Amino acid sequence: MSTETQQDASTRTIVTQPAEREIAMERIFNAPRERVWAVYTDPELIPRWWGPSQYTTEVDKMDFRVGGEWRFIHRSDDEEYAFRGVYREIVEPERIQQTFEFSGWPGYISVETATFEDHGDGRTGCGPSRCSTRPKSATAWRPPAWRPV
């Protein structure tokens, strides 16, 4: 198992790789669980945070229900990337499970599970994990700045 950590003034991210095909992360947000849930589930809020800052994000499709499809598009002056998936499980405000596929790597589909844990002090732990269908593709998406600790 490998572990990586990123930290700034408002959040902390811990990334672990418990198995070859799985990555687990936990972020602690200084916000109540209902607010963190809202930024994950409101198509008006997603473009404010989803993806790298050098891209704009368009919510092309977001049918937020079990079996519903989602598709987000990143755009910059000279690049465009699409991401898509299907919602598999939704338990408000505790858990979202969905598939994830990057248009640049068709067929590399992972299953993401985001859990929202109320810490009781106005903070929320959000624990997305990604389980890949193929070896090593679970780690291929990591930003290069994340290095093993």
Image: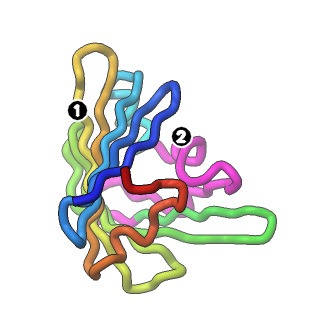
The residue that mark 1 highlights is 117
Task: Report the amino acid beneath label 2.
Answer: Leu
> Is 146 rendered above or below residue 20?
above
103 and 9: which one is in front?
A: 9
Left or right placement of residue 112 versus residue 100 in this view: left
Left or right placement of residue 94 versus residue 110 in this view: left
Task: Kindly identify the residue that appears in the image at 38 percent across and 66 percent down.
Answer: 69
Q: Residue furthest right?
A: 77
Q: Quadrant of residue 98?
A: bottom left
Q: Secondary structure under badge 1?
A: strand
Q: Secondary structure under badge 2?
A: loop
In contact (CB < 8 Å): disc 2 and disc 1: no
The residue that mark 2 highlights is 45
Per the model, the C-alpha gap separating discs 2 and 1 is 20 Å
* Residue 52: percent from left, percent from top: 60, 53
* Residue 74: percent from left, percent from top: 62, 62
Instruction: Check the picture and name the quadrant holding the N terminus.
Output: bottom left
Task: Kindly identify the residue that appears in the image at 69 percent across and 63 percent down.
Answer: 75
Left or right placement of residue 83 versus residue 131 in this view: right
Task: Kindly identify the residue that appears in the image at 53 percent across and 61 percent down.
Answer: 144
51 and 86: which one is in front?
A: 51
Give the magenta range: 41-69
28 and 47: which one is in front?
A: 28
Q: Residue furthest top?
A: 121
- For label 2, count other residues whose C-alpha is less than 10 Å away and answer few (under 14), some (14-19) or many (20+): few
- For label 1, count other residues whose C-alpha is less than 10 Å away and answer few (under 14), some (14-19) or many (20+): some
Residue 1 is inside the magenta segment:
no
Task: Kindly identify the residue that appears in the image at 33 percent across and 70 percent down.
Answer: 138
* Residue 108: percent from left, percent from top: 37, 81
> Is 129 rendered above or below residue 33?
below
Left or right placement of residue 145 versus residue 108 in this view: right
